[in-house]
Amino acid sequence: MKRVITALTLLPLLVSLSAPAPASAAQVEVTEAWVKPTIPGTENGAGYMTVHNTGELAVTVIGIRTDAARAAEVHRHIMTEDGMMRMTRVPKLVIAADETVTFEPGGYHVMFFGVKNPFKVGDTVDFEVLFEDADAVQVEAEVRQLVEPFNQES
Ligand SMILES: [Cu+2]
């Protein structure tokens, strides 16, 4: 009898868990994901993507998870007072409803620390974008060469 009561008590909880969350992975689209090939002799890499919040509530990116490197973080480039570009970690990136944030060289990027196997053109790198208020989004990024004027480390 005790078991039956327990099951009935759990039922409302299960129902509420399966109800749609306010913000979910379906409300965040990641497209145009790519990473730069790593430079021989270096162990850091950078990746880019377009993150579109298609939902009606803001979402907050709180990190990146990957098996391809020792660690990964959201970074952005900022211009310092003396006109130098430097990059800084972005612990929380709020994306408003229907807002699109483009990660691109010179701006937001996914920073990979301690890349396990060098990123080579044509390979793919898997990572997950972690949200404070939505499910993680799986990303498969293609390694691509891009000729651009910014610092190769970023
Ligand atoms: Cu960086």
Image: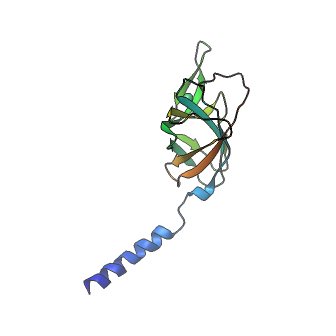
Provide residue 70's location: percent of width, then percent of height.
46, 36
Colour setting: rainbow
| Depth order, front residue of 96/70 | 70
Residue at left 66%, top 46%? 99
Residue at left 25%, top 83%? 2
Provide residue 136's location: percent of width, then percent of height.
53, 52
Residue 4 drawn above or below residue 13: below
Provide residue 116's location: percent of width, then percent of height.
50, 36
Residue 91 in view in this figure: no
Q: Is residue 145 left or right of residue 68?
A: right
Residue at left 58%, top 56%? 25
State ligand 1's quadrant. top right
Residue at left 63%, top 23%? 152
Q: Is residue 82 left or right of residue 92?
A: right
Picture quadrant where residue 94 is located? top right
Quadrant position of the C terminus in the picture: top right
Q: Is residue 149 left or right of residue 6?
A: right
Residue 66 drawn above or below residue 22: above
* Residue with the most extreme bottom position: 1
Residue 142 drawn above or below residue 17: above
Quadrant position of the N terminus in the picture: bottom left
| Depth order, front residue of 132/57 | 132
